[in-house]
Image: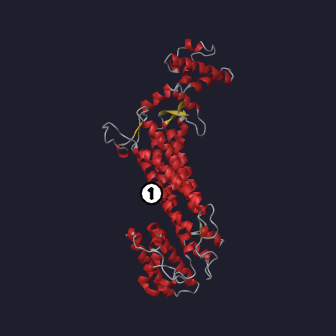
Amino acid sequence: MALWGGRFKEGPDQRFKDFNDSLKFDYRLAVEDIEGSECWAEAICQAGVLTAAECQSLKQALEELKSEVLADPQAVAQAGDEDIHSFVERRLIEKIGNLGKKLHTGRSRNDQVALDLKLWCKKACHEVKQAIIQVEKQLVATAERYQGCIFPGYTHLQRAQPVTFAHWVLAYAQMLERDYQRLSNAEELMQTSPLGSAALAGTAYPIDREKLAQALGFKHATHNSLDAVADRDHVMELLSCASISMVHLSRLAEDLIIYNSGEAKFVTLSDKVTSGSSLMPQKKNPDALELIRGKCGRVIGALSGMLVTCKALPLAYDKDLQEDKERLFDAVDTWLACLEMTALVFEGLVLNEDQALQAAKGGYANATELADYLVAHNLPFREAHSLVGQIVLYAIEQHKALEELSLEEFRRFSAVIDDTVYPHLHFDKILAARDVLGGVALGQTAGEIKDWQTLLAEHSAKLGQKD
C-alpha cells in the first residue's frame, strides 16, 4: 500500500519501484516504527484526534503486530511494501479497518524515519557496549593469568624494552575502553526526539513534544524541525565510533598474527579460531584475526560513504538519506561480529612464555638500563647512550647478550663499570624500576587489573549484565 498517490495520474514504473523501495533493508526498523507509533497514538489522543477507546484499539493492534514481526522478521522484508512505514500502516488497517488510517495524522514519514533510526542507533550503542565489555573481560582475565610473564616490547617492529604480556594486553583494553566511552558520548547526543517535526515545519496539532520524547525514552525533543528531519549525525557518529574501534581491533589482530607466526611463536591460537589449508596439511591459519583485520576497511568504507552522502544535502529531507541504513546496519553487524571473535580468540589464547622471554633477552632490551646505570655513575646521558651503542655492537659481534659479557669486556668501554652492573641488567629489576603510574612494574599491573575488574563490574551493572 502506497502512502501517497492522490496527485498522480498513473502508478510508478516497476523498475522505479524496485529502485525506490526500501523495505528489503529498513524492515529492521519494524519494532522501532511500531514503538514510535504507539507513543504517537497516545500523543494525538491527548491532542483530541483520537478517543481513548480508539487509542487503546490502535495500541493493542500495534502490540499484536510487534509480536508478529519479532516472530518472523524476514516475512516483513518480503512483504512487498514500499518501506517499513507503509508495511506497518497496511497491516494496521487490515487488523482494525479505517481506524488504522487515523494514526498518521500530524505525522510525516520524514520525522517517522528520523525517529526510527535514532531509536535503532540508541539500541545499537547499548548492544555494542555490552560486546565491548565482554572483550575487555577476556583481556583482563588474560592479563591476570600472565601478569608476571616477560614479553618483548617493540617500536618500529624492532625489539625495544622488556614489558610483560599483561601490560601489552591491557594496552588494548585501554583502547577498547575509549571505544566504550566514545559510544557513551555518542549515545548522549542521541537523546533528542525528532517526532512531531512532521515533514519539515513541525506538526499542526497541539502535541506535547517534551512529554512524547520522554515516553519514547529520550531526554528532550528537538528544537528545530528542519534540522530534526535532516539530521543524521547520530548515524555518522555511530559509524565513526565503529571505525575507530575497528582500527583498534585490526591493530590487535595484526599484533597477534605476527606473534603467532612461525618466526615469533610467542602465542598459540585455539583451534576454534583457526583453519587449515586444502593443500598443506601442516597449516594452521589465523583466519579469525585476518578477517577482523580485513573487515576494518569495510566499516571505514561505510563511514566514508555516509559522510559523502551528507556532505552537500540541502535542508530538509532528501531521498539521498535512504542510503543511511544499509551501510549502518552492515557496519554495526560487522563490528559486533568482530568483537565477538576477538573475545573468542582470547578465550583460548596461550602464551609461550619461554619463547617470549628468550625474544626479550635476545633483543638487547636491557640496553637502556645499562645507559641509566652509566648516568648514575655521573656520565651525561648522551655520552652514556653512545657508549652503550658501542657495547651492544660488540655484544652482537660476539653473539652474546649484554648480561653475558664479562666485567673485563665491559671495562674495555668504561672504567666506571664494576660488578654492580649485573643486577641492573636482570629483567625483573628492569620491570621493577618502572614503578610509576602506567609503568610495567608488577605492582602497577596488579593494581591496574584490580581497577579494571572494578570498572567492568560497574559497566556490567549499569548495562544490566550479569558477571
Q: Quadrant of the N terminus?
A: bottom left
Secondary structure beneath label 1 = loop
Q: Residue 19: in sight, yes or no?
A: yes
Q: Position of residue 294 (x, y in %)?
A: 46, 47
Q: Is residue 282 left or right of residue 253?
A: left
Q: Position of residue 192 (x, y in %)?
A: 60, 68
Residue beneath label 1, please?
Answer: 466
Q: Residue at x 45, y 36 (%)?
A: 259
Would you identify the image quadrant in which residue 79 lies? bottom left
Q: Quadrant of the C terminus?
A: bottom left
Rendered view: 286 above or below 301:
above
Q: Label 1 is placed on what type of residue? A: Lys
Would you identify the image quadrant in which residue 49 lies? bottom right
Q: Position of residue 166 (x, y in %)?
A: 49, 39
Q: Residue at x 53, y 86 (%)?
A: 50
Rendered view: 51 above or below 263:
below
Neighbour tally class for label 1: few under 14, some 14-19, many 20 plus, Cα within 10 Å: few
Q: Residue at x 50, y 16 (%)?
A: 398
Q: Is residue 109 left or right of residue 261?
A: right
